[in-house]
Each structure stands twice: as C-alpha cells, then as structure tokens.
Amino acid sequence: MKTEPIRCFWVDDSQLYRDYHDNEWGFPVTDDRRLFEKICLEGFQAGLSWITILKKRENFRAGFAHFDWSQVARFGDKDIERLVNDAGIIRHRGKIEAAINNARCAEKLMESEKSLAAYFWKFEPAPATRPQHITRDALRSMTQSTESLALSKDLKKRGWKFVGPTTMYAFMQAMGLVNDHEETCFVRQAALKARKKLDLNKL
C-alpha cells in the first residue's frame, strides 16, 4: 500500500488541493500575470475557502481574459454584467468591480515599477524576522505580518481594493515570498531550493 507523503495540515483529501499544495503553494512566483491573478483571486476568496476558488479558477481565467490586466482594465459595464451572471465564478459585484479597479491600478503601478514582480518582491521579509520553526501552531497564529501590513498599506494608498493585511499575507504565502510549508512537509525543501535559485536582480 502506497504511503502518502506528509503535507501541511490544511490540505484536504482532494487531488485538486493536493496538486495545488505540492506544485504551486509556497514556490516563488515572478510571472506578472500569475501575481495579478492571485491577488485578484485572493480578493474573491474573502469570506470563502480557497478550495472554492480553486475549483472555479479556470472559469475565472476565462471570464477575466486570463488576467491580462491591460485587457481587464478596459472592462466596462457590459463586462461587469456578464461576470455577475457567470455561474462559473463568484458572482459578487463588489469583488468583480474591485478586480477591474485593480487592473487599472496595476497599469498605473507599471509607470513607476519595472514589473509587478519587482514591486511585490520588495516586500519579502528578511530571513532573520521569520520564525525558526514553521509548525502547525505557528501557522495558525500567523495571519499577517509586518511586511503584509506594509504591502496592504501601500496598495491601498495606490487605490487597490480587497488587499487587507491578512489577504496580503495569504498572497505572500502562496507566491513564495514566505515559505510557510511546515517543517515536516515534504514540499518545504523543494520550495526553499526554488527560492535559492531566484535572482531578484533580474526581475
């Protein structure tokens, strides 16, 4: 009988969730479109579970032009109505409008930054500020950080919406700005290795 590897405590038995945990969550992301997608989907997740969003991710991608913010920024009232009536996504008008607003904010941000990646990775915490041991208890108490507070504050100042400090900490966890795989998780070392290979000077 095949023994399942040890994963982080929050992973359920669904293959979709396991694949996400094993291959995506906590690995460093520098692709601008993936970063924009994730920050939008984190906004849609507010008040919901991530598995709910994950099951609808392909529908979100289809509805939001695969999160090409230059296209999403051009969305108007007809697009909002189309999305509000799209049963394949979360039909929350405020969150839909926030994603469109954030696309316009992303365009504005690109006037002063080389890339979204270059901007977001400036908020990576210094290793010395991180807990020495990432355990289940530690993770349950880490819902935000000094850096997620700073990122949230800066984005809000720039007009972004649904970017509170807890939401931004979840974004940082998923995109690999922090490695919150538990010490016992079989993915932790692979995520650490991927981060060591990342050259922030090339962003």
Image (cartoon, rainbow, N blue to C red):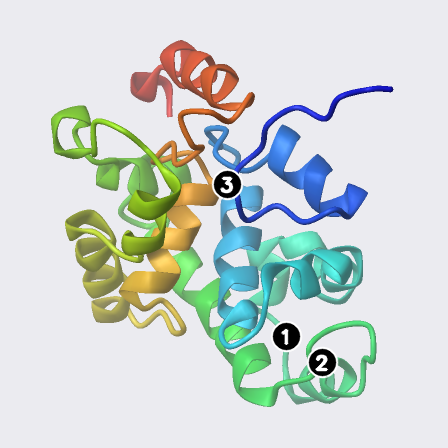
Q: Label 3 belongs to which residue?
A: 32
Helix, strand or loop at label 2? It is helix
Q: Could you say which quadrant of the image residue 84 lies in?
A: bottom right
Q: Residue furthest right?
A: 1
Q: Are marks 1 and 2 in contact (CB under 8 Å)?
A: yes
Q: Residue at x 50, y 41 (%)?
A: 32
Query: Mark 2 is on which residue type?
Result: Asp
Q: Nearer the viewer, residue 64 or 50?
A: 50
Mark 2 to mark 3 CA distance (whole Å)? 23 Å
| Number of numbered discs overlaid on the protein picture | 3
Q: Is residue 156 left or right of residue 72?
A: left
Q: Label 2 belongs to which residue?
A: 79
Q: Position of residue 19 (x, y in %)?
A: 72, 36
Q: Residue at x 64, y 30 (%)?
A: 22
Image quarter hosting the C terminus: top left
Vertical side of 58 occupied by 174: above or below: above
Query: Mark 3 is on which residue type?
Result: Asp
Q: Position of residue 162 (x, y in %)?
A: 40, 73
Q: Are marks 3 and 1 in contact (CB under 8 Å)?
A: no
Q: Residue furthest front?
A: 1
Vertical side of 105 occupied by 146: above or below: above
N-term-proximal mark, 2 vs 3:
3
Vertical side of 2 occupied by 88: above or below: below
Mark 3 to mark 1 CA distance (whole Å)? 19 Å
Helix, strand or loop at label 1? It is loop
Mark 1 to mark 2 CA distance (whole Å)? 6 Å
Point out which mark residue 75 bears. Answer: 1
Q: Is residue 152 left or right of residue 99?
A: left
Q: Mark 2 Cα within 10 Å, few/some/many (few <14, many 20+)?
A: some
N-term-proximal mark, 3 vs 1:
3
Q: Residue at x 73, y 80 (%)?
A: 83
Which of the two discs, 3 and 1, sits closer to the camera?
3
